[in-house]
Image: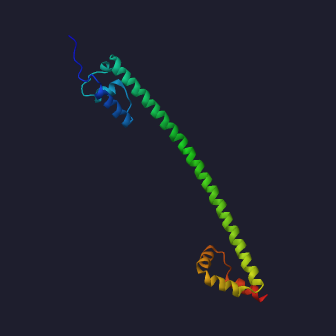
Amino acid sequence: MARKAKDPSHDELRQVLQMMLDRDEDITARGVVRLHPSLNSASDITRHVIRKALLDEAIQKQQEIRRIAASVKKTGTTVAAEKLQALEARIQHLEANEAARIASHLAMIQAVAEIGGTAKLLKFYEAHAEIRDRLHSQGALPVPANVLSLNKK
């Protein structure tokens, strides 16, 4: 008389294999037996065609998951480094543009002051205090002594 299987649908085995996949625990017949409630030895898996197929499928799936994870980890750091380098280049470009704008703004104010337009500039900046404050904080406005010295020339 043949023995009755305790789990003919192998649901418990599938659950153990999935749990091991989720934990990224090495999948082996012995490892599965340690966690399985009714299997007692590795040969209970390796000598049974369906259980062996389920084990092999889980091992193959784990290898594929690990291969993909390693690939993502490796390319992920490369991509992050490339993005960081691109962002640093962009920052340098923007800083150079800001320096050029500040220099040109100072030159424009000094040119206007040279031809006697200081009063018009002051009137403009009174109406646009926010712009004046921003330019002042960036160092884009000349020091008042420089403007006065230009007017005296």
Q: Which residue is most to the bottom?
A: 152
Q: Residue at x 66, y 83 (%)?
A: 124
Residue 123: give x, y in percent of width and height.
66, 86
Frontmost residue, 41 versus 113: 113
Q: What is the x, y in percent for residue 142?
A: 68, 79
Q: Quadrant of residue 150?
A: bottom right
Q: In this view, does 143 lie to the left or right of 33?
A: right
Position of residue 101 measured from the top left corner of the image (x, y, whole percent): 69, 69
Left or right: residue 69 versus residue 13 is right
Query: Which residue is at 43% across, 27% downward?
Result: 60
Colouring rule applied to residues? rainbow
Residue at 52%, 37% in the rendered image: 71
Please, which residue is most extreme toward the left here?
A: 1
In the rendered image, the quadrant that contains the N terminus is top left
Residue for point 38% across, 28% down: 27
Q: How many marks?
A: 0
Quadrant location of residue 61?
Answer: top left
Q: Residue furthest top?
A: 1
In the image, residue 105 above or below residue 69: below
Decide: is 113 above or below 56: below
Image quadrant where one finds the C terminus: bottom right
Where does the image place residue 99, in percent across and percent down from the top left?
A: 68, 68
Q: Is residue 27 left or right of residue 64?
A: left
